[in-house]
Image (cartoon, rainbow, N blue to C red):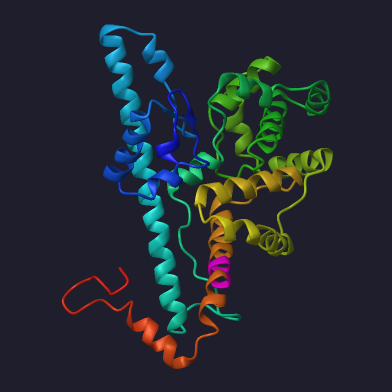
Amino acid sequence: MIADLQPGEVVVPEKIDRISRLPLAEAEQLIASIRAKGAKLAIPGVVDWSDLAAGAEGVARIVLESVQELLLKLALQMAHDDYETRRERQRQGIQLDLQGRFPRKGIPMPRRDYLTALQQAALVSLPEDEGEFIRRYSLTTPDLALIQQRHGDGKRLGFAIQLCHLRFPWQVLGPRESPDPRLPNFVAHQLGLDPGGWAEYAQRDETRREHLQLILAAGGYRAFSVAFYRELAVWLLPLAMQSDQSIGLAQTVLQELRSRKVIVPPIPVIGRLCAGTVTRALRQGYRPLTEPLGSIRRKRLAALFQPKEATSVSVLT
């Protein structure tokens, strides 16, 4: 394909991993060969400043071109590392299945931290963009009507904050949990109240629970249940067979919960749901490869994954 490229043509790979399956040095050689033909490479997900750099001069152009190359190298290396990680997981899964150690029906799925602490926080953090923040938390006329039915400034403020927090990130504030300070400040400003009133309201568990039930009923929210957990696991399985990207699957689950007006449970629950579903997806993917093999062939194939003596390298690695 590269030999047929013409000057001025644009090469658009479907995904960056079409290039990043190669080690970084080989990926850079491939990109250099495309550019040598006078063609341009446009990779989805990588910021392209080439036109901006072409219009700049002197130091500004050098800086823009250098930053462009750095971004490309980082994207290639990260995608290649992810590709190698997935290959290693597949190798380990096949080996376990051949040895009969892969989880089967009736055996509990492994529980592990599928999402990092940083990823968990990012999934339920309030919007950083000011415009989106205002859009999500601006009180409507029906909102104000509900809020004004509460007696006392503290109760109005607390009710409004719970209402907004359920709106996004669709989670209930726990008894000892405080919202992002930006939320009380923004809500209090709309109501003409003191944001400090939240601290006193937060101590009234009975009032908070009572207000929460009113908000759930008014908004038509549904509770997250064991039955829904199982239903969601079945729904997620086809997606997990296509990708085991933790943050992507978790974001998809949250979008589905919100579309069904289901309250988002603690994020570790979402992590366990994704981890268990990915495990089942891997098992289904490996089964057609290993089940037709007899016991002798299984043992022979499993032996190929065993590290060589005094090394960590096997015949297939």
Question: Which quadrant of the figure contains the N terminus?
Answer: top left
Q: Residue at x 48, y 28 (%)?
A: 10
Q: Which span of residues is magenta-colored?
A: 279-284
Residue 51 or residue 107, whichever sits in front: 51
The residue shown at (47%, 52%) is 115
Of 258 and 214, the residue lying toward us: 258
**Residue 294 in the image: above or below residue 281:** below
> Measured from the top left, where is residue 5 in percent x and y?
44, 33
Does the stretch in magenta take in 161?
Answer: no
Residue nearer the viewer, 126 or 56: 56
- Where residue 227 sits: x, y (%)? 73, 64
Spot the residue most to the top: 57
Q: Position of residue 23 (x, y in %)?
A: 30, 48
Q: Residue furthest front?
A: 4
Is residue 283 inside the magenta stretch? yes
Which corner quadrant of the image does residue 180 belong to?
Answer: top right
In screen coordinates, is 307 left or right of 106?
A: left
